[in-house]
Image (cartoon, grey):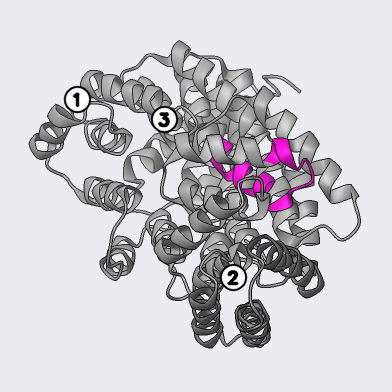
Amino acid sequence: MDFSVSRQRLFVLVFTMLFGVSTALNCTAQETSEPDDAVAVFNQGQDAHEKGDLKTAIGLYQKALQIIPEFPEAEYQMGTAYLALNQPENAEKSFRRAVELREDWTLPMAGLGAILVQKNQFAEAEKILTKAVELDEMNSPAFVALTDLRLKTKAAPEILKQLLAKLQLLTSKANPTASVWSARAALERNLGDKASAKTSLSRSLSIEPNNKSALIERVELALSENDLAGALEFAKNLNKIAPESDNSKFILARVYADNGKPDEALKILDSIANPSAEVTALRTQINANASENVADLEKQLATDAKNASVLGRLCLILRTENPIKALDYCRRAYQAEPSNLNYVIGFGAALVQAKQYENAVTIFRKIIEVAPDNYTAHANLAVSLFQLNRYAEAKIEYRWLSEKQPELAITYYFLGIIHDRLTEYLDAMVNYQLFLKLADAKKNKIEIEKINLRLPSLQKQIKEKKGKK
């Protein structure tokens, strides 16, 4: 996040502050040289800061503060340098001191608020950031941090819409920052407007191609579209730009886990020296997803009854063995994390295993409204409709499946049966033949035998011109 201010603006601030100090104290000639020395050292720090020599810049800011301890501009700039060096604890101290020295200065408020959000200290962050935007309604860094706060605390859509309106106003002004566009994209994605989110991200990255918040949002957007390969590529790029960032490591580990690569994910998590609660939760989730031991997983629920990862794993591994019990775990996983589509699909699949087909149809139709291209949802809906003898509806779903995966033999088997039972004999014959062409002799032995028994009478019915035309 960019908390820097222009050299000219800072010089005016410094001059005003130092002039006030020297006038109030009525310093001697020797004393009045101290503010001049502090300004000179501060400017040297600014030069080093602009060149990217952050450690030298921090040393010079510290030297300026030794000359004049009450120097909020030096504290603020030192905070931004610490932040760039991935030293949030030191940055927090500097921002706090800057706010202490100048209570109405909203830039260090924004910096401090952003750090507190990252530390999940939401109550204090809320107080500071709300004050910052009240004092300065055009404070972009504060609104960016406030967006992060609202998303992390899962604010209601109405609140997100109000915040989005503020960011839309900020991006309509001259020279909006990449971080403002990225924050706008995050709100748009969370409100379901992925097309606008992509546009906002393009704007962000055109301004600053390596903007970390924009790259993070690209990962989140790809994950929301179930583009796991794209998310992994974006996460790797983010990690190249910020290899020492714990947040970058965490995001890459999460994407590896989503891509079914738990070993890679755990290796990255092991490299995080001071794991946060999020890191610990992800490790627990990965281990739960790999576990096949029902008893161990159920023990974890004894101390954390709403752990969606554990509930989801139990939902999956018990689905065939004990579908009724699995159904309860699936339902609880869905209730614990209703935004996770996998848990909703797991709940629906458990309904299918439990032969509760009517309820399964209702669930999967709702899933398809939200995720129209989800193959698993269509497959389970097709099975449920078939089992309910709702062949006309099932035919639509199986045709969709055959278009998405035309090499999958079993789809044509069920299409053949559906057409057969609807007395659409020519179509039945076509699909039976496609199945026989693609089927595996061992894997599909039973289905092949059934069709071979059916084909002679079917050919006779077609020859006699029976069935629907």
Which of the image's four quarters has the N terminus? bottom right
Residue located beneath label 2 in the image: 74
First to last magenta residue range: 133-150
* Badge 3 amino acid: Glu
C-alpha separation, residue under disc 3 versus residue under disc 2: 45 Å
> In the depicted view, which residue is nearer to us: 461 or 21?
21
In this view, the mark in front (3 or 2): 2
Label 3 element class: loop
User: Residue 52: x percent and y percent?
Assistant: 61, 85
Q: Nearer the viewer, mark 2 or mark 1?
A: 2
In depth, the one of 37 and 197 nearer the eye is: 37
The residue singled out by tag 1 in the image is 322
Q: What's under tag 1, amino acid-wise?
A: Asn
- The residue depicted at 36 percent of the width and 54 percent of the height is 441
Q: Earlier in the sequence, mark 3 or mark 2?
A: 2
Give the residue at mark 3.
Answer: 337
Q: Judging from the image, what secondary structure is the residue with disc 2 in?
A: helix
Residue positioned 24% across, 48% down in the render: 284
| Mark pair 1, 3: CA separation | 22 Å
Q: Position of residue 469 (x, y in %)?
A: 76, 23
